[in-house]
Image (cartoon, rainbow, N blue to C red):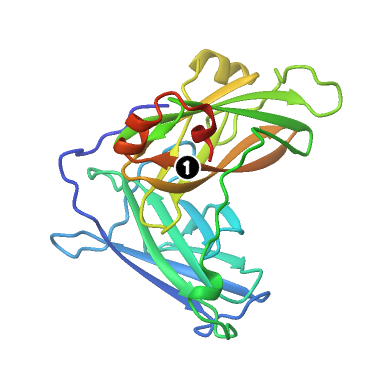
Amino acid sequence: MTLVPGDPFDTREYSLEMTTVPAAVKACEPVTLTFTIRHPGTNALITGYEVVHEKRYHLFVVSRDMEFFEHIHPQQLPDGRWTIETTLPKPGDYRILSDFLPTGGSPQFVGRTLETVDFTGDLESQAPRLTPDVDVNKTVGSVIAHLELEPAPLVESQFAHLAFTLTDSKSGRPVTDLQPYLGAFGHALILSEDMRDYVHSHPYEDLDAVSKGLGGPTVTFEGYMPKAGRYRAWSQFQRNGEVITIPFTVNVLTLDEAYRNPGAPAASLR
């Protein structure tokens, strides 16, 4: 990834205002989201942004129950604001996560909540009920993804590595024809069950291989796990022009649990 100018020591969160058209959002009907970003010190409208992985604005839309996931990219308006149209598939609450880098600032990952007006349930009815995956193999489209966690088990306050080995779902052969997707051979959003902690991760990779456009069969993502609990990771890969999204749910142990169960293989996912 190309280095971009910024100020990593200024960790203030920028002001983000999200508006919708229509104002009353309904499930299964198009809605236009517009984002206005302002400087945390001067309140000035931000118009300059750096390109990160081929885009200046990454947007993630996740339903409160964590069953729906979307990774999309707003377009900048002439006045500096950002806008995009999307459709929410069912009534309820959604977390709208904005990922961008203001020119001269620090990376921003800012969340806002959106609720559809046709939702008649309560908060408990849409709470995520994540069950850590026991089967470490998943088939999505043309790919079988095998996941290994490093370390196993995952432990709070440590960096975790999600190491994927990809094989062709028909032939069983290693996938060696991954195509760069937004400047990388993969993207992953790792989100805690309470939706308070998240990371947008990209794999370690050979930049020369990315430039040649051939990747696989192994792709590894890294993410810091600030606390114990369950996390869902949506990992995305591109093959034959198709973006494939693979969700996995993992469990992160407390330090005490890890000390009591050193190297317990079942704890790595459960």
Residue at image mark 1 = 251
How far across and how far down the image is residue 53, in percent?
47, 36
Say if 265 sits above or below 187 in the image.
Answer: above
Which x, y percent locates residue 129?
55, 60
Q: Is residue 156 visible?
A: no
259 sits left or right of 236 in the view: left
Picture residue at 25% right of the left edge, 58% below the top: 14
Quadrant in the rendering for residue 116: bottom right
Where residue 260 sits, quadrant-wise, is: top left
Give the residue furthest to the front.
260
What residue is drawn where x is 57% and y is 15%? Answer: 209
Which quarter of the image is occupied by the N terminus?
Answer: top left
Task: Report helix, strand or loop for mark 1.
Answer: strand
In the image, is residue 209 above or below residue 148?
Answer: above
- Foreground of the two, 77 or 93: 93
Figure label count: 1
Q: Is residue 269 above or below residue 146?
A: below
Left or right: 35, with 205 as reference point = left
The residue located at (18%, 65%) in the rendering is 43
Closer to the camera, 120 or 115?
A: 120
Left or right of 206 in this view: 99? left
Q: Residue at x 79, y 33 (%)?
A: 142
Place of residue 23 in the rendered image (x, y in percent of width and height, measured from the top left): 49, 84
Q: Tell me the amino acid under the disc marked 1.
A: Asn
Residue 171 is at least partly visible in this image: yes
Viewer-closest of 146 and 114: 146
Residue 224 is situated, as x and y percent measured from the top left of the image, at 35, 36
Question: In which quarter of the view is residue 158 placed?
Answer: top left
| Few, some or many residues within 10 Å of mark 1 (<14, 14–19, 20+) | many
